[in-house]
Image (cartoon, rainbow, N blue to C red):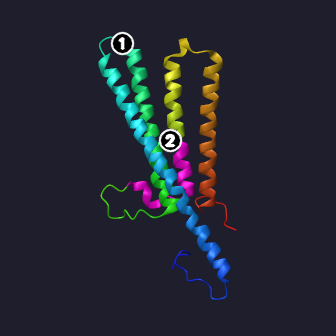
Amino acid sequence: MSSEEAPPSPHQPAFHRTLGNLIFFSRWLQAPLYFGLIVAQCVYVFHFLVELWHLIGKASKITETEIMLTVLGLIDVVMIANLLIMVIVGGYETFVSRLNLQRHPDQPEWLSHVNAGVLKVKLAMALIGISSVHLLKTFINAEKMAMNVIIAQVGIHLTFVVSALILAYVDRMTSGGGKAKAH
């Protein structure tokens, strides 16, 4: 029996049971936040379609570099949309309520073993991917960029990489994957 299904202790005062139930119910306050991210996802889909339409409309009039920068922008939108899906689906499943997708043919593979630690590492990796695309766009367009902007972007990217490595290490140590002993 999981901790959610455990019957209330007969020795626990009614006030404590009511307070505990209220605190547990408060997780549903996050549901509108996830709905808001779904709306943001719709905005990104619209933005993607507008940019794709512009690319198609001016395809014969632009340089290969401009096409590459536009396509990298589209890839960036897709990666941010993937990040949103991870946060919406993984966050809802982890913090609000189970989605019960075990038999659904389209259930994401990672969802079956998602927890707060795994979600943090996946989000950090997604941020590194997004940052990499931005950095690639900067390098392609470097002659038009100030050196301090390039250096700042490299520094931010390296910060994401180091942070992700630390998160992955801490998650591995706390989940028993490393040699650290549980207390």
- Residue at image x 54%, y 12%? 144
Note whether 136 is above or below 158 in the view shown: above
Dominant SS in magenta? helix
Residue bounds of the magenta highlight: 108-126
- Residue at image x 61%, y 58%? 178
Q: Residue 57: percent from the left, percent from the top?
A: 30, 18
Question: Which numbered disc, 2 or 1, marks the residue closer to the eye?
Answer: 1
- Residue at image x 65%, y 82%? 14
Quadrant of the snapshot with the C terminus: bottom right
| Amino acid type of the residue tagged 2 in the rendering | Ala
Name the secondary structure under disc 1: loop
Where residue 62 is drawn, which disc sits there?
1
Q: Are marks 2 and 1 in contact (CB under 8 Å)?
A: no
Note whether 10 is above or below 40 in the view shown: below
Q: Residue 44: percent from the left, percent from the top?
A: 42, 36
Which of the pair 6/145 is nearer the observer?
6
- The residue that disc 2 covers is 126
Q: Is residue 55 left or right of residue 12?
A: left
Q: Residue 128: percent from the left, percent from the top?
A: 54, 37
Say if the magenta span includes residue 113.
yes
Q: Residue 27: percent from the left, percent from the top?
A: 56, 62
Q: Is residue 90 left or right of residue 177?
A: left
Which of the pair 122/177 is nearer the observer?
122
